[in-house]
Image: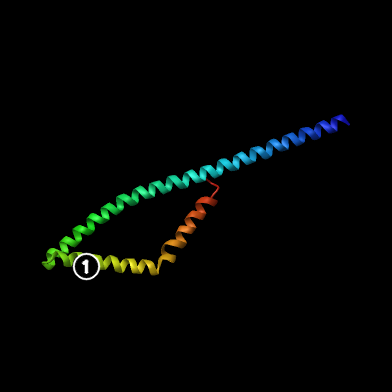
Amino acid sequence: MDTIQENMEDLVDHLQDYVETQKELLLLAVKEKAASAISQTVIWVIAGVFGMLAFTFLSVALAMWLGRLLHHSGYGFLIVGALYGLGAALFYNFRKPLLQNRLNDVLLTKFTNSDE
């Protein structure tokens, strides 16, 4: 009878160790995915900052060039601003299929992908 009770106690101890190990593995997997998402976000933010700087300088250059062609610098900035306003309106109207749905898909894939 003692042998069965000892075996049951060993089994319960091993089961508790197994559950604890699984919990630790799950916590590590969550931490790894969070760290990966944060690092990807930082990379995209840095790239976005440099992209916005380049975009800003190119926009100013385009506005100045158009202003010289039209012999009035204000017209160049007006045209470039109008183009960005039109682009913003189009983006706002098509934001769900262009960005939101794709971003949701990317994030869901990133967090549910167990290959990494």
Please give the name of the residue rendered at 68% of the width and 40% of the height, measured from the top-left corner. Answer: 19
Image quadrant occupied by the N terminus: top right
Quarter of the image holding residue 65? bottom left
The residue indicated by pointer 1 is 79
Return the x and y of residue 112 as percentages of the image width and height.
55, 51
Return the x and y of residue 30 as percentages of the image width and height.
55, 45
Return the x and y of residue 92 as percentages of the image width and height.
38, 67
Task: Name the colour scheme.
Answer: rainbow
Please give the name of the residue rendered at 61% of the width and 39% of the height, measured from the top-left corner. Answer: 24
Badge 1 marks a residue whose secondary structure is: helix
Label 1 sits on what residue type? Ile
Instruction: Answer above or below: position of 43 versus 85.
Output: above
2 or 115, which lies in front? 2
What residue occupies the far right of the structure in this picture?
1
Return the x and y of residue 93 as percentages of the image width and height.
39, 70
Instruction: Answer above or below: position of 114 versus 66.
Output: above
